[in-house]
């Protein structure tokens, strides 16, 4: 029985063409709604891991783009200084972009696997020494936290759209006489702002991860403007002191 004061609604038959347009609009709106709902879902902890294998020999620079947005977040520089025939030095250094920071005080810490990298960590701004080698009249030595290490980690604190994220980069190093060579073998970051990551962690608590796979580009692509790739390097001449 109809409620008092209300008139029954009559069915309306739309013209065929208008009906098609309404149906198409409904489908499009539904698809858009699904996309909006997917974007609006609460963020879940997710690790973005990129395995790679990049040699950082003397006079090479590698730019590290943790979140693959085409912008370098940290630069690892291996620079050879030649003062004279018997006085030479090789410096391995990491340089953060802008306000990004590195785990460690005066130098970059060479962290073991399983270390928590988050707000509780000790971070500092500015360039940080990793390792250095010297040749002084035929007397050779290497020093620094990153001298002759295997599978150690940089703890990294960086910004995405004004929010703080944490990540790591894994490297091994060797030193022949005074020349240092590093190999970058992978890096990762936590997609949730402010959430800590553990060095070596490539998956979240649920075992989920996003992997970009081995960095597929020839090195040097970012330097030449191909912003879709995350690692770049270029050669520099040895720096001489006159």
Image (cartoon, rainbow, N blue to C red):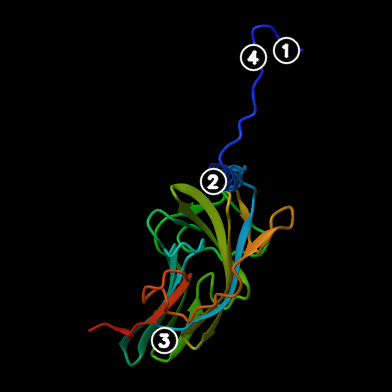
Say which mark, if any, is on residue 7.
Answer: 4
The quarter holding residue 232 reads bottom left
Horizontal side, residue 36 vs residue 124: left or right? right
Position of residue 15 measured from the top left corner of the image (x, y, whole percent): 56, 40
Closer mark to the observer between disc 2 and disc 1:
2
SS of the residue under disc 1: loop
Name of the residue lying farthest toward the top = 4
Position of residue 162 measured from the top left corner of the image (x, y, whole percent): 43, 47
Q: Give the labeled residue for mark 3.
A: 135
Q: Earlier in the sequence, mark 3 or mark 4?
A: 4
SS of the residue under disc 4: loop
Q: Are marks 1 and 4 in contact (CB under 8 Å)?
A: yes
Q: Give the labeled residue for mark 1.
A: 2
Q: Is residue 59 visible?
A: yes
Q: Earlier in the sequence, mark 1 or mark 4?
A: 1
Report the residue at 54% width, 76% height from top.
Answer: 147
- Give the distance between the C-alpha atoms of the residues marked 3 and 4, in whole angstroms: 98 Å
Q: Give the labeled residue for mark 2.
A: 17
């Amino acid at each position: 029985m109809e409620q008092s004061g209300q008139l029954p609604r009559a069915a309306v038959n739309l013209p065929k063409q208008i009906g098609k347009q309404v149906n198409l609009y409904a489908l499009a709106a539904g698809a858009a709604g699904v996309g909006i709902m997917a974007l609006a879902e609460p963020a879940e902890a997710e690790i973005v891991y990129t395995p790679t294998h990049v040699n950082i020999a003397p006079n090479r620079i590698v730019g590290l783009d943790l979140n693959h947005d085409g912008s370098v977040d940290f630069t690892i520089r291996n620079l050879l200084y030649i003062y004279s025939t018997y006085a030479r030095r090789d410096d391995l250094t990491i340089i953060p972009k802008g306000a990004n920071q590195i785990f460690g005080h005066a130098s970059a810490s060479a962290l073991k696997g399983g270390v928590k990298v988050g707000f509780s960590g000790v971070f500092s701004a500015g360039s940080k020494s990793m390792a250095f080698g010297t040749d002084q009249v035929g007397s050779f030595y290497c020093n620094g936290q990153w001298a002759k290490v295997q599978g150690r980690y940089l703890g990294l604190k960086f910004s995405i759209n004004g929010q703080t994220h944490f990540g790591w980069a894994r490297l091994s190093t060797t030193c022949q006489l005074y020349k240092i060579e590093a190999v970058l073998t992978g890096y990762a970051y936590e997609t949730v702002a402010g959430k800590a990551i553990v060095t070596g962690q490539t998956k979240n608590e649920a075992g989920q991860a996003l992997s970009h796979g081995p960095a597929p580009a020839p090195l040097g692509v970012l330097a030449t403007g191909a912003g879709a790739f995350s690692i770049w390097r270029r050669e520099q001449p040895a720096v001489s002191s006159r």
